[in-house]
Image (cartoon, rainbow, N blue to C red):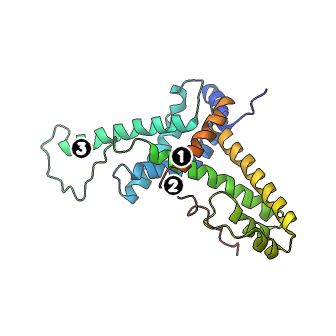
Amino acid sequence: MIFPSTNWSLLAQTTLEGRSEARAALEELCRRYWSPLHHFIRRRGFSETEAQDVTQEFLLHLLEHNSLERADRERGRFRSFLLGALRHFLADDFDRRHALKRGAGVVPVPLDDSTDVVANPNADDGSSFDREWALATLENAFRRLEGEFAGAGRTSTFAVLRSFLPGALETPGYDVAAAQLGLSLPAFKSEVHRARQRFKLLLREEVTATVSLPHEIEDEITHLQQVLMNPGTDLGSRMKPSPPIS
């Protein structure tokens, strides 16, 4: 079986060869992971503004310091690499902030703890990152499916079908939804089945883009499902309808 080229496997090749495709692939992966990174950093004790700044600093660090060149050629999961790199980055930041508070060899100036919070790099075991990663991955697949329906001029159909996809807060009866679209019950159930199958395929594509080897796809999907089953995971709040285009 030929494993398709993915953003992460592309990075494995182009980073070592110094090609510009690596930066574009990394920028795309970082865009997808902004929310998990930001949420993880926020949980470390940073304020909202600080967390946004630190997230941006970390991503720039990855882009500007060729961090991928120091990663193993067998990349594994991008999620694992990214979390490890972030923890290392935050540990360095933690040391730097403590050095500043100590004065770095200069007579220390008392600081008001209410305005100078030094975040603890060990405050989170990674569960919040995985939860946000799972939510972001499903949201990406959901938005792609929504875009496909919109592109086909079927926005109103998707508005009804969305209630039968993962993350729906409330699912109406099939007969009610079928009546909304003017379809027979069998025809509507077929629409739901096709939408769910397409969603599963898009989700698989989202996961595939972040692994290096075929067997890791199933492992990541299984992990994603396990994370979403944990208490405190609110997918429904993420799957709000997109605002209408004016």
Kind of residue sitting beneath label 3 = Leu
Q: With respect to residue 13, does 167 lie above or below?
A: below
Most foreground residue, 60 or 115: 115
Q: With respect to residue 213, does 107 lie above or below?
A: below
Quadrant of the rendered image containing residue 161:
bottom right
Tag shown at residue 100 = 3
Q: Mark 1 points at which residue?
A: 227
Residue 130 coordinates in the image, percent (x, y):
51, 45
Check disc 3: other Cα within 10 Å, few if <14, some if 14-19, many if 20+. Answer: some
Q: Do the residues labelled 2 and 1 touch (CB within 8 Å)?
A: yes
Q: Which of marks 2 and 3 is nearer the N terminus?
A: 3
User: What is the CA distance from the residue labelled 1 to the residue labelled 3?
Assistant: 38 Å
Residue 76 coordinates in the image, percent (x, y):
59, 29
Q: Which of marks 1 and 3 is nearer the N terminus?
A: 3
Which residue is at a point 59% across and 45% down the rendered structure image? Answer: 225
Quadrant containing the C terminus is bottom right
Kind of residue sitting beneath label 2 = Thr
Quadrant of the rendered image containing residue 165:
bottom right
